[in-house]
Amino acid sequence: MQTLESIWEQTSSKLRTFILHRVEDEAAAEDLLQEVFLRVHQNMSTLKDSEKLESWLYQITRNVIIDHYRSRRVHSELPETLADPQELIVEDDAVADLSGSMFEMVNELPSPYREALLMTEYEGLSQQDLALKMGISLSGAKSRVQRARQKIKDSLLTCCHFEFDRYGRVVDYWEACCCCSSQSC
């Protein structure tokens, strides 16, 4: 088992870079890095397989970043009476806010993926028809659409943290950078 000091020497710069890609400034990144190593120190005994040290460290780091954004949320008090759960409708504010950014992300995709996604998602073309129109196999068309969706998902998850309701719908998000906002970086 490695010592905390040797783990620090081997991984701190990589973890700092990982954190800096997800938070707003260097001071916050440094604070979060310290929190990561505090948790590592407190939980070293729970690591059963030292070969999984790196993935364990990154999982702790992701959790620290999530906790950081959760702590920044503004909490409001509950009203005296709550609405009947059957009457509640989940608002699509988060989805509406992100729709403009998503279209920009689609436009930034490499041409084959962008065309496949636009034709299927925006024009309503079936994947079978997409394959015929593009002169590729059905599995090739499916692959392009799936890869395009994954690239959009990766872009969104890189720049934002999402909160979902129990049905998997987006109900809120926090921007980790400005690529999902109307502001320029």
Image (cartoon, rainbow, N blue to C red):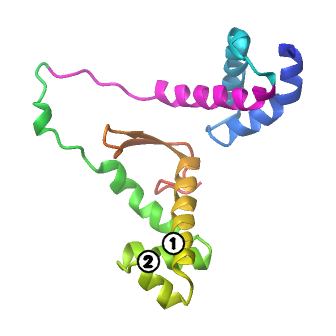
The image quadrant that residue 165 belongs to is: top left
Identify which residue is drawn at 25% across, 46% down: 91
Which corner quadrant holds the C terminus? Answer: bottom right
- Residue under the image location 34 percent in, 25 percent down: 75
Q: Residue 127 carries which label?
A: 2
Residues at circles 1 and 2 in contact by the CB criterion of under 8 Å: yes
Measured as percent of width and height from the top left, residue 144 is found at 56, 72
Quadrant of residue 147 within the rendered picture: bottom right
Residue located at (58% from left, 27% from top): 63
Question: The N terminus lies in which quarter of the figure?
Answer: top right
Give the vertical position of 149 relative to 160 (above or below): below
| Type of the residue with mark 1 | Lys
Amino acid type of the residue tagged 2 in the rendering: Gln
Task: Answer yes or no: is residue 28 visible.
Answer: no
| Residue at mark 1 | 142
Residue 111 coordinates in the image, percent (x, y): 60, 79
Residues in magenta, as a range: 51-79
How crowded pointer 1 is (Cα within 10 Å; few <14, some 14-19, many 20+) is rated as: some
The answer to whether residue 48 is left or right of residue 164 is: right
In this rendering, is residue 159 above or below 128? above
